[in-house]
Image: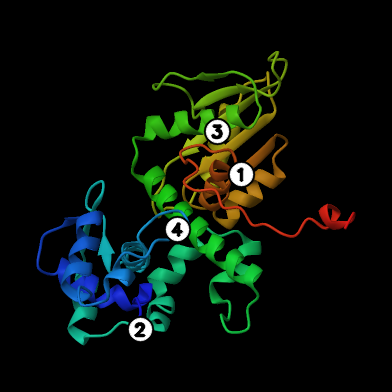
């Protein structure tokens, strides 16, 4: 006997959620364990990861996360999980193999929205376990965890108050090493959300515009208005969005006499992870190797 793989918990998770309006994530994991896997040996049920987490509960929670990426479940409010109509439809079919979820268009779009071009070219999620080296497996696992964090982070950004989103952007730029920032007034700001100092003394200023969009792309008109709102004391601007820029917006920014940097949702969450804004370190793993110098004197 062995513990179920995370993708083998898909249907049990959906079956539990189909009986309730919503559940807290931890309660969901406990119910799935108790109803479907309680007959496993106690030593398996008590098995821990190297960081001390229960292996089975951790796998169930990962199963929930993957179901969320493909929109088979949703998070109606903080910490809670709910089955969607799409989830009910797949539950009626009685099976959801991993390859079907990975080929689901919602899942593909979700993963692409937070992955850089380089990550999309080398997709570590598809690593062949049988032929992979231990380092490949570590990289693959790390990639999956990071993508999940980026996904949730981007969703948080899309849900928060638009004014607070503007403040998050200014906090990020401050963490990146820029000087003090000034939030503009929320009325009549002419499309400028904040002003940051490029240097600590404030000799050079950069204007910022933050658009918290869900699906809508930033258009050429938005870039044109941003450029028009920039006063004569600066020629530099940063336009940030939780979505993407259409081709005309990108073209307008490139052709502008001003220096306009565009940051889309994928790049934004990359920077937030890099500078620890809105995230925290959960676990630190140490990978050790032989110290050859130690044995030089033998």
Crowding at dot 3, Cα within 10 Å, few <14 / some 14-19 / many 20+, comes out as some
Label 3 vs 1, first from the N-terminus: 3
Q: Secondary structure at mark 1?
A: strand
Reading the chain from its start, which is encountered first: label 2 or label 4? Answer: 2
Residue occupied by mark 3: 172
- Is 8 left or right of 165, judged from the image as shown? left
Q: Residue at x 41, y 47 (%)?
A: 213
Q: Nearer the viewer, residue 236 or 266?
A: 266
**Height in image: 213 above or below 123?**
above
Q: Are marks 2 and 4 in contact (CB under 8 Å)?
A: no
The CA distance from mark 3 to mark 1 is: 15 Å
Quadrant assignment for the N terminus: bottom left
Q: Secondary structure at mark 2?
A: loop
Percent x, y of residue 71: 31, 66
In x, y percent, where is residue 252? 64, 46
- Residue 35: quadrant of the picture: bottom left
Res. 97 mark: 2
| Frontmost residue, 216 versus 274 | 274
Q: Residues within 10 Å of mark 1 (few under 14, many from 20)?
A: many
* C-alpha gap between disc 1 and disc 4: 24 Å
Q: Position of residue 205 (x, y in %)?
A: 66, 21
């Amino acid at each position: 006997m062995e513990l179920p793989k995370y993708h083998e918990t898909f249907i049990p998770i959906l079956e539990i959620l189909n009986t309730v309006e919503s559940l807290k994530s931890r309660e969901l994991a406990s119910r799935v364990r108790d109803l479907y896997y309680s007959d496993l040996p106690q030593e398996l049920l008590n098995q821990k990861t190297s960081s001390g987490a229960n292996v089975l509960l951790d796998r169930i929670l990962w199963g929930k996360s993957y179901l969320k990426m493909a929109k088979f479940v949703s998070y109606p409010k903080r910490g809670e999980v709910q089955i969607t109509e799409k989830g009910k439809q797949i539950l009626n079919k009685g099976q959801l193999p991993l390859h079907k979820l990975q080929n689901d268009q919602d899942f593909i779009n979700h993963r692409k929205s937070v992955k850089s071009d380089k990550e999309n070219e080398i997709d570590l999620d598809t690593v062949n376990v049988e032929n992979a080296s231990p380092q490949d497996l570590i990289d693959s696992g790390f990639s999956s965890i990071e993508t999940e964090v980026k996904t949730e982070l981007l969703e948080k950004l899309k849900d928060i108050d638009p004014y607070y989103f503007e403040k998050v952007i200014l906090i990020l730029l401050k963490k990146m090493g820029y000087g003090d920032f000034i939030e503009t007034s929320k009325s009549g700001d002419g499309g400028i959300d904040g002003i940051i100092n490029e240097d600590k003394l404030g000799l050079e200023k950069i204007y910022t515009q933050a658009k918290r969009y869900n699906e809508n792309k930033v258009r050429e008109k938005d870039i044109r208005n941003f450029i028009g709102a920039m006063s004569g004391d600066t020629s530099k601007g940063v336009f940030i969005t939780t979505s993407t820029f259409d081709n005309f917006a990108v073209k307008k920014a490139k052709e502008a006499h001003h220096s306009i940097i565009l940051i889309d949702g994928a790049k934004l969450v990359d920077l937030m992870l890099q500078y620890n804004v809105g995230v925290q370190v959960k676990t630190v793993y140490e990978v050790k190797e032989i110290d050859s110098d130690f044995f030089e004197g033998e």
